[in-house]
Image (cartoon, rainbow, N blue to C red):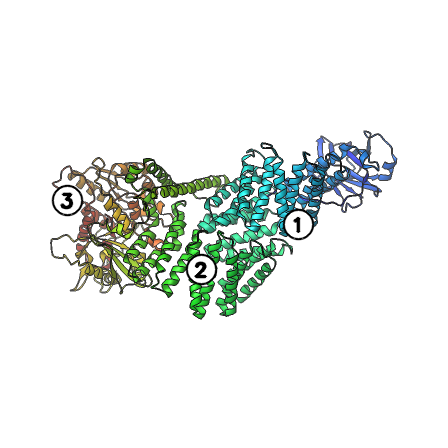
């Protein structure tokens, strides 16, 4: 926290000077010469011989005119001074000197305006300097001293202090203190200016304490400023400043000693000072700023929330009253940011930390480079980034924190009183980054920085316990990495020392207790000694009992206590410990306060322990309800799409675990609800933002419009908001923080609008995750089969029209391990057949034109019995697909002219990457495949399909039609000339069938033109390369000659007439393993963009195979239109068309492994 005025005092009165040497001038009287390699340039005058001046006194020389310099200050000649030597320097080189006899000057009686002069002895005979001066005699009675002498001393000292604040050079500060002490010594107690001069002297001492940490300086500061307050009567114009500066010095001593009476007195003085300043007075912001600082510090010590609210209010008023070009604006912005950060630590309210970062960035941005306060402002900014990182997990935040803290440490001088704080906070940033990335160098850097902080912190300093505590936490983490007992032993030792130095009523005591308890718990894991875990539990219990009601850290402390009880339960098997552990996790998960991520951690532990130890417990339902509800909060709409996906990586598989637990409890309805709630969250959020509001408009037109407006803004912010990186200029980072803050405000407004809507009768579940009964009422005509994969079991849930709840079909022969094994086998074979990497080479297989869309086909291997791909397809058939079809009563239609019934697959986990639609036995007398039983489609979630059923619509006749494009030769990608033939063939078919069609090839199609035409055509066929971006899903793209068509741009277009998209490209439905529950692929993205059905590919496709499937697909669709002249073109029969097209390709090939891999990748998504 930065102070604006005031500092430290000394009460040691110097002996009175008998006279002053004033108005000192140096003038060149010889010929011009060169000194130090340049023309003469004098910089310093040093005075030696004055008692008590040690190594001499320094005075700065000011070049008043060519060849003439003036001394900035006075020379006091005391009674004990016999003579002085004056040395003139150019930079650090001596130029000349002069010896003055004090007794001779005392014996010379002269008029005050008379000047004395004397030539100097020169180091270089080629030049001559003459020094001249005046002498002001000081009689033995102080009240006879001319008042202007003291005033000039005071004013000159203030200039020196300003120079120190700009340069950080202690020489200026030391000389300033000396002059201020002389001014005070020359002023009587009853003098009108005495309070102000004492206040200035105290401020100078405080400045020196801030730099050196010498406790005598802060004591002297308080003494001088208390004397100033005592001398300033009510009504004295300096009284508010005297009160305010004394309050600042008391605050400073409190920060060093932790003595509560100091901070209480500081606040009382600051409040009194502010009350004496009229509203609108230019000094009012100063006093409000200082009051805010003191209130913030007391809040950090006691936790009283009224203090932090008062602090933020005072700081906000201070900033509002400060002109934009005021030099004090950076200080006031920084202090406001620090107070907002403190409140965030208590409440975990995201708006506070967003506001804090914004104002702290502004403070740093308007602070000149080299300003002595810049390190502190960087420190505060880094702290805020650290805290937001803990809440959001956004890696750019921790990178910014490390950068700011490292820069602050580099700028703070060695020996500075606050250097330990800077090192400690740098260590905190390294630690947080280590816990996120696992980079061992960050852990080493954290320990190094914190050791340095401990070493330079004086014993008795109020920050020492916290610094020791943090060092211990780093060492504990190091022990967890290395297993070396010496690390955990040292951790416990330093943390115990920290605890012993902390007052029992200190607000940070719970934190110290928790960290020490963690260390004992870690040592127990290594040694197994029950005394260690008993001690950990005792410490954690004490910490949880001390945490104030409503504190944001409560869930964290409860989770730590729960972990300790669980460790003891696992060691001793005491059911009481299990109950205590569950109770702690339950309390953390359901807490009204605290970061959602910490509450989610508690909910996951609560649910996992119940599943493991009490699988039939009715508490399983509320535990998973809590966990899945919190997932939506940690990946909320206030974040970018990328940020949400980053958050969801840590929750992958949670919904699947919940569904498995529900199946154990014979609750397939709950299993379905949890799978819908916990999977494809980002796409569901986008779908909610685009939900039709027709029903709501009937009840409240204005509310519906407000929701529509905010939803559009949220969608744009989530997909287009920029992200900063290490090279982003600070001014740009401030703009990005403004955007983030506005984004957060939109998300809050969205939540508020939903609350209003849900208060309307009939809209109680508006945009909430759907219930099982709601889902069962909007089913298509054929079954949807959801297959849940968990480490404990595998189950299918079949949703069929007419049933009240899903049909539960256990799959005991299948497992996650088998799914992963099949995935590994399939990946290996795809790689062996060159179907995973893009290459530009050409090689023949099926025929001489079999170019590959981004890949090169391998030579054909025919009829290998038991080949890996055949084994995978057979395993899927026998262990997954066939049991489901049997349970549904679906028989084979092979050999008949009948069309197989539709069936939608909704796989989860590792099964999402396996071709259920191709499962079967393709050889032998008992050959049978899924093709003989059903027409397969996929859906990312049940809701994605039921929403399309619920919102059935006809294709607009004006938009009905097919947009075709081929992009055969994209720079940097392998050529795919077959796309041209493919598109031309489809174009010809469309024209012959009377379908409205537009074909644009290669350079004819621009990115902007494509987006515009997608609005005009209900269907699109993209024959090109595709590229999936797992890190930035909205940047997954189709590669055109004229650039890249990104998925995010398509989604932003909000296509109202979208019906069918055929993605004749590579790997458009591949997905991302780390986000298997999120359907992060182009096909799902096109569904999210509004297309009702999408044809995609699971891996790279052969150019020839792509042509055949595409042309036969449209041939079937166009054939079904014959006899319906004038009818619109749509994709209603697209699943059946793809079924026949792939079947035709399959039947034209053999059953070799390569042939299977040629047709299997084509898949259908949607209705």
How far across and down, in percent of the image, does residue 182 sit? 76, 39
Residue placed under numbered mark 2 in the picture: 584
Q: In percent of the image, x 63 and y 38: which residue is there?
A: 273
In the image, taking residue 747 as reference, residue 989 lies left or right, namely left
In the image, taking residue 455 as reference, residue 865 lies left or right, namely left
Residue 930, placed above or below residue 240:
below
In 3D space, how far apart are the residues under numbered discs 3 and 2 (Cα atoms)?
63 Å
In 3D space, how far apart are the residues under numbered discs 1 and 3 (Cα atoms)?
88 Å
Asked whether the viewer can see residue 43, the reply is no
The number of numbered discs placed on residues in the rendered structure image is 3
- The earlier-in-sequence mark between 1 and 3 is 1
How far across and down, in percent of the image, does residue 865 sit? 22, 65
In the image, taking residue 474 as reference, residue 81 lies left or right, namely right
Residue placed under numbered mark 3 in the picture: 1120
The quarter of the image holding the N terminus is: top right
Residue placed under numbered mark 1 in the picture: 213
């Amino acid at each position: 926290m930065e102070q604006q005025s005031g500092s430290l005092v000394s009460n040691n009165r110097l002996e009175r000077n008998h006279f002053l040497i004033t108005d000192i001038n140096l003038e060149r009287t010889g010929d011009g010469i060169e000194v130090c390699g340049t023309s003469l340039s004098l910089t310093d005058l040093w005075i030696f011989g004055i008692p008590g001046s040690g190594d001499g006194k320094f005075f700065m020389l000011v070049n008043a005119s060519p060849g003439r310099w003036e001394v900035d200050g006075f020379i006091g000649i005391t009674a004990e001074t016999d003579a002085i030597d004056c040395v003139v320097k150019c930079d650090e080189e001596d130029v000349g000197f002069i010896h003055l006899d004090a007794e001779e000057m005392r014996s010379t009686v002269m008029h005050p305006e008379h000047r004395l002069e004397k030539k100097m002895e020169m180091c270089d005979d080629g030049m001559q300097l003459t020094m001249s001066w005046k002498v002001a005699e000081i009689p033995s009675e102080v009240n006879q001293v001319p008042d202007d002498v003291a005033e000039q001393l005071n004013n000159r000292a203030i200039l020196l202090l300003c120079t120190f604040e700009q340069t950080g050079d202690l020489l200026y500060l030391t000389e300033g203190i000396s002059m201020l002490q002389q001014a005070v010594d020359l002023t009587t107690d009853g003098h009108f200016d005495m309070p102000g001069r004492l206040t200035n002297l105290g401020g100078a001492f405080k400045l020196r304490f801030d730099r050196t940490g010498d406790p005598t300086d802060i004591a002297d500061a308080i003494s001088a400023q208390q004397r100033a307050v005592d001398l300033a009567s009510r009504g004295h114009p300096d009284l508010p400043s005297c009160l305010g500066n004394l309050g600042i010095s008391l605050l400073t001593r409190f920060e060093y000693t932790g003595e509560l009476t100091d901070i209480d007195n500081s606040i009382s003085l600051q409040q009194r000072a502010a009350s004496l300043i009229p509203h609108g007075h230019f000094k009012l912001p100063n006093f409000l700023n200082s009051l805010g600082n003191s209130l913030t510090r007391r809040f950090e010590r006691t936790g009283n929330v009224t203090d932090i609210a008062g602090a933020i209010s005072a700081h906000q008023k201070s900033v509002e009253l400060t002109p934009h070009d005021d030099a004090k604006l950076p200080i006031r912005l920084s202090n406001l940011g620090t107070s907002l950060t403190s409140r965030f630590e208590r409440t975990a309210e995201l708006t506070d930390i967003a506001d804090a970062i914004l104002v702290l960035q502004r403070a740093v941005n308007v602070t000149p480079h080299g300003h002595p306060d810049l390190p502190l402002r960087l420190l505060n900014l880094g702290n805020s980034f650290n805290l937001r990182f803990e809440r959001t997990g956004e890696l750019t935040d921790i990178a910014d924190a490390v950068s700011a803290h490292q820069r602050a440490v580099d700028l703070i001088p060695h020996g500075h009183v606050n250097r330990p704080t800077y090192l400690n906070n740098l260590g905190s940033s390294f630690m947080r980054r280590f816990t996120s990335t696992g980079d061992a160098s960050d852990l080493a850097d954290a320990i190094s920085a914190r050791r340095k902080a401990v070493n330079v912190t004086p014993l008795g300093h109020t920050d020492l316990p916290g610094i020791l505590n943090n060092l211990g936490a780093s060492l504990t983490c190091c022990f967890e990495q290395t297993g070396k007992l010496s690390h955990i032993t040292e951790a416990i030792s330093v943390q115990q020392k920290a605890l012993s130095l902390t007052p029992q009523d200190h607000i940070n005591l719970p934190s110290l207790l928790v960290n020490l308890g963690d260390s004992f718990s870690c040592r127990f894991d290594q040694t197994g000694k029950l005394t260690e875990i008993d001690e950990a539990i005792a410490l954690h219990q004490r910490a949880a009992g001390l945490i104030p009601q409503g504190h944001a850290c409560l869930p964290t402390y409860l989770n730590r206590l729960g972990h300790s009880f669980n460790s003891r339960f696992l060691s001793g098997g005491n059911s009481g410990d299990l109950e205590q552990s569950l109770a702690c996790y339950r309390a953390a998960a359901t807490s009204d306060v605290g970061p959602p991520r910490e509450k989610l951690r508690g909910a996951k532990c609560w649910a996992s322990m119940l599943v493991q130890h009490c699988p039939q417990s009715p508490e399983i339902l509320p535990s998973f309800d809590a966990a899945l509800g919190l997932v939506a909060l940690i990946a909320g709409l206030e974040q970018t799409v990328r940020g949400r996906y980053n958050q969801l990586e840590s929750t992958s598989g949670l919904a699947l675990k919940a569904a498995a637990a529900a199946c154990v409890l014979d609750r397939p309805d709950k299993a379905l609800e949890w799978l819908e709630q916990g999977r494809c969250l980002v796409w569901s959020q986008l779908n909610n933002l685009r939900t039709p509001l027709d029903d709501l408009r009937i009840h409240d037109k204005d509310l519906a419009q407000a929701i529509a407006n905010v939803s559009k803004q949220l969608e744009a912010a989530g997909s287009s908001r920029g992200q900063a990186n290490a090279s982003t200029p600070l001014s740009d980072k401030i703009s990005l923080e403004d955007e983030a803050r506005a984004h957060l405000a939109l998300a809050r407004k969205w939540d508020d609008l939903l609350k209003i809507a849900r208060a309307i009768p009939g809209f109680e579940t508006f945009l909430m995750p759907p219930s099982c009964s709601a889902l069962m009422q909007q089913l298509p005509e054929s079954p949807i089969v959801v297959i849940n994969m968990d480490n404990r079991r595998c189950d299918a849930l079949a949703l069929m029209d007419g049933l009240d709840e899903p049909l539960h079909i256990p799959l005991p022969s299948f497992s996650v391990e088998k799914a992963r094994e099949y995935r590994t086998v399939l990946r290996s074979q795809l790689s062996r057949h060159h179907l995973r990497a893009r290459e530009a080479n050409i090689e023949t297989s099926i025929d001489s034109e079999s170019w590959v869309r981004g890949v090169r086909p391998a030579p054909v291997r025919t009829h290998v019995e038991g080949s890996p791909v055949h084994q995978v397809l057979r395993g899927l058939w026998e262990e997954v697909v066939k049991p489901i079809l049997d349970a549904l009563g679906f028989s084979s239609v092979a050999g008949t002219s009948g069309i197989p019934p539709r069936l939608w697959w909704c796989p989860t986990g590792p099964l999402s990457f396996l071709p259920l639609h191709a499962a079967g036995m393709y050889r032998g007398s008992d050959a049978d495949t899924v093709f003989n039983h059903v027409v397969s489609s996929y859906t990312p979630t049940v809701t994605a399909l039921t929403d399309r059923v619920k919102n059935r619509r006809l294709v607009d006749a004006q938009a009905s039609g097919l947009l075709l494009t081929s992009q055969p030769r994209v720079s940097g990608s392998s050529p795919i000339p077959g796309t041209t033939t493919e598109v031309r063939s489809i174009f010809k078919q469309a024209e012959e069938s009377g379908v409205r069609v537009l074909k644009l090839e290669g350079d004819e199609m621009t990115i902007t033109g494509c987006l515009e035409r997608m609005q005009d055509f209900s269907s699109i066929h993209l024959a090109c390369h595709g590229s999936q971006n797992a890190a930035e899903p909205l940047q997954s793209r189709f590669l055109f000659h004229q650039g890249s068509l990104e998925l995010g741009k398509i989604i932003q277009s909000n296509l109202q007439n979208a019906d069918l998209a055929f993605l004749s490209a590579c790997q458009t439905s591949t997905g991302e393993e780390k986000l298997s529950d999120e359907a992060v692929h182009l096909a799902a993205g096109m569904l999210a963009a509004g297309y009702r059905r999408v044809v995609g590919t699971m891996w790279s496709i052969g150019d020839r195979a792509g042509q055949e499937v595409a042309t036969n697909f449209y041939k079937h669709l166009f054939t079904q239109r014959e006899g319906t002249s004038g009818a619109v073109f749509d994709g209603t029969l697209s699943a059946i068309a793809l079924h026949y097209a792939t079947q035709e390709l399959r039947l034209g090939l053999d059953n070799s492994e390569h042939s299977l891999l040629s047709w299997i990748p084509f898949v259908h998504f949607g209705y």
